[in-house]
Amino acid sequence: MKEIHVFYAPEAGEVQELPAEEAAHCVRVLRLQPGDEIRLTDGKGTFYRAEITTATGKRCLFRVLEAWSQGKEWRGCLHLAVAPTKNMDRMEWLAEKATEIGFDELSFLDCRFSERKVVKTERIEKILVSAMKQSHKAFKPQLNGMEDFKRFVSRPFAGQKFIAHCYDEADVSGAEKREEDKAMDGGKPFLLDELEADRDALVMVGPEGDFSVEEVRLALANGFRSVSLGRSRLRTETAALVAVHLMHIRHAK
């Protein structure tokens, strides 16, 4: 079967020309010519079947032959907020795989124990676009820059809010530990069991050193609920991907 090349054209419904970077890939790398058929996505839920009309060294123009909407494979808005690791390769891997699975929004948190305080989002944005095209999705996740943890948890969010951390519930509440709190999940409920499929969901995942106890308490005071991602101790990017996968499973149509 002939391969279908997918390009990101956020204004495809109005401007029938590929963005510069997409045009360069189309013309210089793939060497597509006028008359060749391509598929476009605007990243907002619509696919377009188009035909190249002009292909020069720097420009690629097309005409739309057909347009159709692609519904999301999941319900609601799935939002992941994560404290980025010192090695950005791990965050880039997370962005790629989470997009392939399917989610709506990615935020970065500046926490007390964060290893990285600055994130350049340009490369992450390109990875989101590439993963969207590779997985033949019509929705590109929204990418937000780094935000202070305290400011983030105080912002309004209409859906369910969860914070995944490694503390026992007793450590957070200051109460005496119960026998069930000694388990690896610290007595916290499993995220999949707490998610409600008909509501938007936001999950926060902390840095390698975890959130501080004070941060967890602040999150709880702002309506977040403590959850476990399983009994294994996971690295940040693994925990974040598990969170996306569990949200996707619960919200699948």
Image (tube, helix red, strand yellow):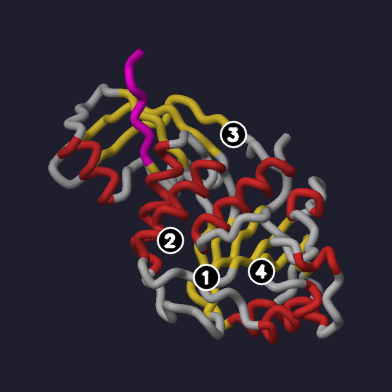
Quick one: label 2 or label 4, which is nearer the N terminus? 2
Circle 1/circle 3 CB separation < 8 Å: no
Q: What element carries label 3?
A: loop
* Looking at the image, residue 15 lies above or below residue 110: above
Residue 182 horizontal/vertical position (percent): 76, 67
* Looking at the image, residue 137 lies above or below residue 151: above
Distance CA(mark 2)–CA(mark 1): 10 Å
Q: Mark 3 points at which residue?
A: 70
Q: Name the residue under label 4.
A: 165
> What crowding class fits label 4: few (fewer than 14 Cα within 10 Å), some (14-19), or many (20 or more)?
many
Q: Residue at x 43, y 61 (%)?
A: 91
Stretch of the chain drawn in magenta: 1-7
> What crowding class fits label 3: few (fewer than 14 Cα within 10 Å), some (14-19), or many (20 or more)?
some
> What crowding class fits label 2: few (fewer than 14 Cα within 10 Å), some (14-19), or many (20 or more)?
many
Quick one: label 4 or label 3, which is nearer the N terminus? 3
Circle 2/circle 1 CB separation < 8 Å: yes
- Residue extending furthest top? 1
Q: Name the residue under label 1.
A: 108
- The image quadrant of residue 205 is bottom right
Distance CA(mark 2)–CA(mark 4): 18 Å
Left or right: 160 as drawn, with respect to 44 = right
The label nearer to you, 4 versus 1, is 4
> Relative to the observer, which residue lies in front, 146 or 30?
146
Residue 24 horizontal/vertical position (percent): 21, 44
